[in-house]
Image (spheres, rainbow, N blue to C red):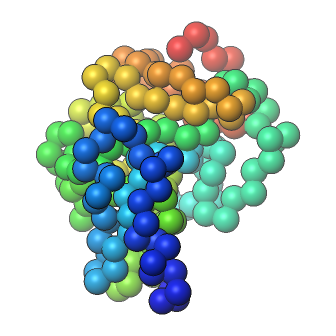
Amino acid sequence: YDDANLVAREQHLEMLLCPTDDLSPTGYVAMGDERYAMSCYVANFGPPDLDDTQEKRDGVFSRSSETRLSQILDGLSNTLMVGERQNGPFRNGAVHDNHFEYETTWSGAVREINDPTDDHGHMVLFQTGHTPNSPMSDDRDVSAPHHGVALFLLCDGSAHTVAEGISETVYNALGTRAGGDVVEEF
């Protein structure tokens, strides 16, 4: 923690906000007495569960990851890099551990003050545990404010809409960087 970062972390960055999201452009994620400007985009952790050991991920990003494009063996056009997430209450009104809303910020995962082992990776990462906009989604998933689709940036730099009805098998394959999966059209 450094007070010098206070001003920066509270700045909303227009390029990291979805134009159709009316909460995030002025909203903050609060952690104790600290607040962090919201964002609408999260990086691909892929499968498995984001709450498990952070270093054991199959996607492109994790804590302190240094993934090179040459390590994305499934192909840059077959691998998700960034997904869209709305902030606010979970779609199904449920609770995941002590979380009940999507918390997305651009400035980084914030460790819990009372439990430094809880690094809140969900603030900057998504897992492919539930398909986009799933009614079962929680703070680790993609949940966009668009009806029927979510927006993604693939590792080749192209932007795509992915239908919420995508097969879980294909979605998980798109979430891996080196799973050896052959991805059908999505």
Q: Nearer the viewer, residue 8 or 128?
A: 8
Q: Quadrant of residue 165?
A: top left
What's the residue at 70%, 24% (across, down)?
Answer: 77
Position of residue 17 measured from the top left corner of the image (x, y, whole percent)? 42, 46
What is the quadrant of residue 21 in the picture? top left
Task: Please identify the residue farthest to the left as the structure is shown.
Answer: 93
- On the question of residue 127 being in view, the answer is yes
Identify whether 129 is placed above or below 139.
above
Work out which residue is located at the far front of the displayed protein and give it: 14
> How many badges with numbers are in the image?
0
Question: Depth check: 150 or 70 in front?
Answer: 150
Q: Residue at position x 45%, y 81% from top?
A: 6
Q: Position of residue 120 (x, y in %)?
A: 43, 65
25 is higher (above) or lower (below) than 165: below
Rendered residue at 29%/58% (across/down): 26
Q: Nearer the viewer, residue 10 or 82?
A: 10
Q: Is residue 119 visible?
A: no
In the rendered structure, the answer to whether residue 3 lies left or right of residue 184 reads left
Q: Residue 158, percent across and down?
A: 64, 26
78 left or right, relative to 171: right
